[in-house]
Image: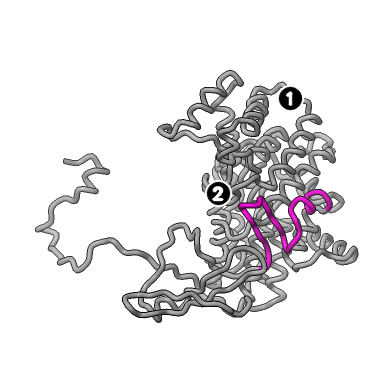
Amino acid sequence: MTDAKRTATLNIEGKELELPIYSPSAGPDVLDITKLYAQGKVFTYDPGFTSTASCDSTITFIDGGEGKLQYRGYSIEDLAEKSHYLEVCYLLLYGDLPSKEQQTEFEDRITGHTLLHDQMQHLFRGFRRDAHPMSIMCGVVGALSAFYHDSTDITDINQRELASIRMIAKIPTIAAHAYKYSIGQPFVCPRNDLDYASNFLRMCFAVPTEKYEVNPVLAKAMDRIFTLHADHEQNASTSTVRLAGSSGANPFACIAAGIACLWGPAHGGANEAALQMLHEIGTVDRIPEFVARAKDKNDPFRLMGFGHRVYKNFDPRAKVMKESADEVLELLGIEDNETLKVAKELERIALEDEYFIEKKLYPNVDFYSGIILSAMGFPTSMFTPVFALSRTVGWISQWKEMITDPKLKIGRPRQLYTGAVDRVYTDVENRLPTEKYLKFNGGS
């Protein structure tokens, strides 16, 4: 963080406080309120932390107004076109693009850790057959700390490094095993001769009775999905990982916490919700009905996969993902699929209709990623696990940055308390039934 060269004056009942203002390398200035309570005996109120910077970071920058996303200063468009996921992983973890030798060494290290401890098979089999893959991932990732004791000491830089490599290497195997278990097929082990994306696709779709060859177009599309979702600044799941890590929790527990947060439909479940919406619309002739509902202020319905909370312009990831979607659909020859017809027509309307243009409701990355994953053969229950797989490197990078931050403190948000105070205790014999209990239990 740069030194504050300006201050803001806050007047509280005649008492003036000088609050430092920091200027970042990119983005809006930041008002430092760390001493606000000590000096002014007041807190700030910011539900959702939408106006609060919880840390300073050098990893990812977003300019929502300009539709810009950068990893370590590199545009997401350049990385998606010229790079590949494991190179992006190196960039996020270490701050710079690797040399050829460094890249080879890094990829070899990842490849050497893709297998899971053999006893973890028993852990998978402890889940019900119909368990959601995300519930399995939450449990299995958290359990890694029970199997890999030599990478849980967060004070040891070598153990932190080993934990980082292991998480990136093993998360595709965990996600693929979760999928295989959910559909009742045998686990497929990773292969060292395949690249990261191809290995994941093979572990998901190969069966022991048949030969399976990964199509390079599908592998490229999957690699792009991984790259475009690798990190996204201080979103809900990343903030969860940082908050868990601030307590000193081991890295596997922190990533499990991030997966749990990502599972929420408002976060990682957005592409699943977008595809479910397409299924709900059903046919192209019903699109005007749903578009009219989306425009109706009195109707709670909204089109999923359009617009973005952060991007007030076009989602920069969506353009790249659209290219991949077109390539995948052309390869698989499934343009006649009714759901995809609905998606294409909705896309056309969103890019041409004045209502959508005015409100900047452009198709976002979730809209296209759901189409691609569905076309590849993934059920909607696997959309969020793929997202978790992609985001693991971002979580790990943010966690490593946080651990070495000299300003690290355990997270402890404040609150605006609006409950009762100074109530007098009444003995149980003299209490009446509470209204809330009666409401939820059908009593009278």
- Quarter in which the C terminus is drawn: top left
Which scheme is used to colour this image of the protein?
one colour
Residue 357: x, y in percent?
A: 60, 37
- Quarter in which the N terminus is drawn: bottom right
Q: Amino acid at mark 1?
A: Glu
Relative to the observer, which residue lies in front, 297 or 283? 297
Is residue 68 a member of the stretch shown in magenta? yes
Relative to the observer, which residue lies in front, 423 or 140? 423
Which quadrant holds residue 21?
Answer: bottom right
* Secondary element type, mark 1: loop
As drawn, 290 above or below 57? above
Relative to the observer, which residue lies in front, 164 or 64? 64
Residue 253: x, y in percent?
A: 57, 63
The numbered mark at residue 352 is: none
Q: Residue furthest left?
A: 430
Residue 328: x, y in percent?
A: 77, 34
Q: Amino acid at mark 2?
A: Arg
> Is 420 placed left or right of 386 in the picture?
left
Q: Residue furthest right?
A: 101
Which residue is disc 1 drawn over? 335
Label 1 with label 2: CB-CB less than 8 Å? no
Q: CA distance from mark 1 to mark 2?
A: 30 Å
As drawn, 20 above or below 107? below
